[in-house]
Amino acid sequence: MRFSPYYRTEASDQILTATAFESDFILQNPPTRNWGIQDGSGDPIVLHIRDYFSRYVWDHPYHSSATVTLINTNSDFLSQGNLINNLLASYPVAQYRIVEYHQPGTNPAYNGMDWTSLMVILKDAGGGNQWTLVGLAHGSWTI
């Protein structure tokens, strides 16, 4: 499974097998991994898997109040920032489904820029009847 800390796939994205993913969550002291490059600073994102999930997957309770959208075109994405979104180029609709869980900004002081999204990427594993989770991408305002 591919983990993209932003709604743009990069060569630096971490890709884990199911075994490595499960092992990292179970281990008392999992290894740190380089998950990509931090927007703004350019620093590497070096975190344990649980810390990565806290920041880039479970940063909002998407199950309770997010708007859920099946993405077919770039104009379907509710998340809009200054990064070029290449998810549909990386995951073409013919083989994949991207589902965006979008939470709009809530703090008036940030003028809507505190929005966040989680993109769940599924791959067709059986003629449109079986979908396998192959990626998670995070969206938020970037510098």
Image: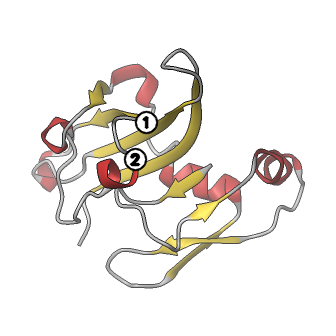
* Residue at 23%, 65% in the rendered image: 83
Taking depth in this image into account, of 103 and 91 the one nearest to the observer is 91
Q: Residue flagged by tag 2: what amino acid is it?
A: Tyr
Q: Quadrant of the C terminus?
A: bottom left
**Mark 2 element type:** loop
| Mark 1, other Cα within 10 Å: few <14 / some 14–19 / many ≥20 | many
* Residue highlighted by disc 2: 91
**Mark 1 element type:** strand
Q: How many marks?
A: 2
* Left or right of 85, for residue 32: right
Q: CA distance from mark 1 to mark 2?
A: 6 Å
* Left or right of 91, for residue 133: right
* Residue highlighted by disc 1: 96
Question: Up-down: is 35 above or below 44?
Answer: above
* Left or right of 105, for residue 119: right
Q: Residue flagged by tag 1: what amino acid is it?
A: Tyr
Question: Up-down: is 58 above or below 53?
Answer: above
Question: Up-down: is 117 above or below 66?
Answer: below
The image quarter containing residue 133 is top right
* Residue at 76%, 45% in the rendered image: 18
Taking depth in this image into account, of 123 and 35 the one nearest to the observer is 123
Image coordinates for residue 35, horizontal then vertical, percent: 57, 68
The image quarter containing residue 95 is top left
Image coordinates for residue 105, horizontal then vertical, percent: 21, 43
| Mark 2, other Cα within 10 Å: few <14 / some 14–19 / many ≥20 | some
- The answer to whether the residues at label 1 and label 2 have Cβ atoms under 8 Å apart is yes
Taking depth in this image into account, of 36 and 15 the one nearest to the observer is 15
